[in-house]
Structure formats: structure tokens, C-alpha cells
Amino acid sequence: MIKLDILSDPICPWCLIGKTRLEKAMEAEGDHPFVIEWHPFQLNPDMPKEGMDRREYLETKFGGKENAVRVYGEIAKHAEEEGLDIDFGAIKRTPNTVDAHRLIHWAGIESKQNAIVNALFKAYFKEGRDIGNAEVLADLADSAGMDAAVVAKLLDSDSDVENIQQRDEHSRQMGVNSVPTFIVANQHAVPGAQPVALWRQVMGELKAQQDG
């Protein structure tokens, strides 16, 4: 098996689109070679702990309402092409994602990372839930088979906050400046939400190397 490290943020729509395309390619290949691990990268490392109003955030980030509408119109088009049911209108706040990344980290210890990542994307993009809220995160942990009480207690502490921040900063120092970024076999960085065809080509080449 080949390690595939994915740097992502659960509020990043391109991360969801990129994940969906990768999964379609893996399903098409059947015996794909990847073992996946998710890693933290915050789109907004300076976001206040409590998050902020989403409209204010988007208009500030993209320089006004018109640009925000244009950018998200393009994102919505690509999401629809992949069959994703995203309800951007339901999202009222843009959260700080340190706690969501802590949950992904703890899920990894229990081999439940994919389930938690899926739950976070669904909660944020389909249900409009605030994934910066500890109660929401504990509920998602419970849905993935984790101990919600333990997760709630950890979230109420500073456990692994520094870990997440250091890993995020390390990725930036290594040259990562956007997500998703996929790192294949600890060697090759593949940035962006790549199409299914590219992933199938990558997997085909990797399997050919293994067979050789």
C-alpha cells in the first residue's frame, strides 16, 4: 500500500470537491493502492475563536459581494458537476477550525478519520452546522462511533491545540499555501482538486511500478 497524505480544511469547498474526485477514481480502479491520512491546514489561521458571520467573511476575503458571488458561483458549478449537494445558503458562520482539526486528529488514533472527515463536510456544507461548536463536534464524534463525552472533555481543554498549530505552520514552511494538497508516498505533492482522470493515471502508474 502507498501512503496518501491529504492536507485539508473541513470548511474548504475545493477540499470536498477534491476528495469526491479522488474517491470516484479509487472506486473506478477498484484495487487502489492508497492508505489515507488527513492533516490540518487552516484556511483562516487568524480566525477568531468564535468564528465570524459568513457573509462578512466572504465579502472581506473576496473584496466585496460581487466577487464573492462570482467565486462561489464557480465553486457551486463544479460541486454540482460532481453530484455534491451543497447548501451554501444554510451556512451562517465561518468557524475557527482548530477544534475540528483536533477531532480529526483524535479520530485518527481510533482509525476513524475518514468517518469524521465525511461527517464534518456533511455537517458544514449540507446541513449548515457550526463545526466550530464543541457540542456539534461531540455529536459528530458520537455518530462516528467515538466517545462523545471524552471528546467533549478534550475539546474543553487545550489538548493538541499546539500540535495542530505546529503542523499547520510546518506545512506552510514546506511551501503549502492552499488546500487540498495531496502528498503521494511522502515524495510527490499534488495540489488542488484534481480530476478523476488524473488520479486514475497516477494510480495506474503506481500499480505498474509495484508490478514491475
Image (cartoon, helix red, strand yellow):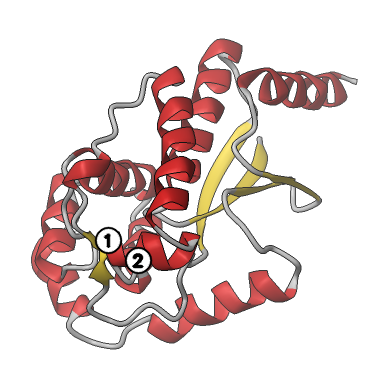
Q: Nearer the viewer, residue 154 or 75?
A: 75
The amino acid marked with disc number 2 is: Tyr
The secondary structure type at the circle numbered 2 is: helix
Disc 2 target residue: 57
In the structure shown, which secondary structural element does the residue marked by tag 1 occupy?
A: helix
Instruction: Point out residue 61 in the picture as x, y percentages from the top left corner.
Output: 46, 65
- Cα–Cα gap, marks 2 and 1: 5 Å
Residue 10's x, y, as percent? 38, 53
Q: In this view, does 85 lie above or below 44?
A: above
Quadrant of image for the C terminus: top right
Q: Which residue is drawn at 28% across and 81% down?
A: 49
* Residue at x 17% of width, y 83% of height: 156
What residue sits right under mark 1 in the picture?
A: 54
Quadrant in which the N terminus is drawn: top right
Which residue sits furthest right? Answer: 212
Relative to residue 101, is residue 156 drawn left or right? Answer: left
